[in-house]
Amino acid sequence: MNRFAVALSAAALCASFGALAAPPPHDWHGGPPAHFDGRYHHDHYYPVRGYVSATLPGGAISVAFGNGHYFFHGGVWYSPYGPRYRVVVPPVGIVVPILPAAYATLWLGGAPYYYANGTYYAPAPGGYAVVAPPPGAEDAQPVPPAPPPKPAPDPIVYPRNGQSAQQTEADHQDCDRWATTQPSAMADASVFQRAVGACMDARGYTLR
């Protein structure tokens, strides 16, 4: 297992323990009534349509459409309801710049569609448009996600200044730790490896 995978596994283990210790999400326990969307093995919970919230979730995207205004967050659409916000069915044709983090991919009639929370999306200029259920949607099977790429092997480290094997390993461990603090390093192996390479180069090593 390469060093990025080890570092990522350690971070994931810490996150798992944190999740076990954290209270359950407020949205689904004592919060808004929720429904479970298991279509296409999507398997996610969402607040029911018609639920009214006093505030929008953080990071909600504002989308103007026709004479109305909508907000989108995590596959859920909201519209203003007096001073509050109501969970609604999005109008067909409205375009959102990004898909929710969780969705099912379908391939129908030679074109891709994306499904989440009872809503179908299709690629459109500026992002993804809400569309009516496409023909064949009832019997469609989700496209399985692509397998993750194989991790790159650890590079060969050459000590330019005659460092001992013990010093090389100690420096490599220090650089591994430092690399995990860089933005996006724990989500992108290439960023992690570049950070390690830059650190090791500064300490007098060549990586191939």
Image (cartoon, rainbow, N blue to C red):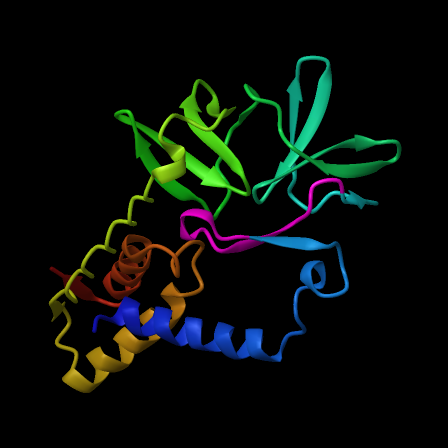
Residue 183 belongs to magenta span: no
- Which span of residues is magenta-colored? 37-50
Among the 4 quarters of the image, the one containing residue 140? top left
Q: Is residue 131 left or right of residue 79?
A: left
Residue 49 belongs to magenta span: yes
Relative depth, front residue between 42 and 195: 42
Residue at image x 47%, y 21%?
126
**Image location of residue 46, percent across then percent down:** 62, 50
Q: Is residue 134 left or right of residue 6?
A: right
**Image location of residue 117, percent across then percent down:** 55, 43
Task: Single out the residue that lies furthest toward the top.
Answer: 66
Q: Is residue 207 left or right of residue 89?
A: left
Task: Single out the residue that lies furthest toward the bottom.
Answer: 166
Task: Single out the residue that lies furthest toward the front.
Answer: 139
**Image location of residue 108, percent across then percent down:** 31, 30
Residue at image x 32%, y 43%?
141
Among the 4 quarters of the image, the one containing residue 8? bottom left
Q: Is residue 118 above or below residue 167?
A: above
Residue at image x 38%, y 72%?
177
**Image location of residue 137, percent across then percent down:** 39, 34
Counting every numbered tag in the picture gives 0
| Position of the N terminus by quadrant | bottom left
Relative depth, front residue between 175 and 46: 46
| Position of the C terminus by quadrant | bottom left
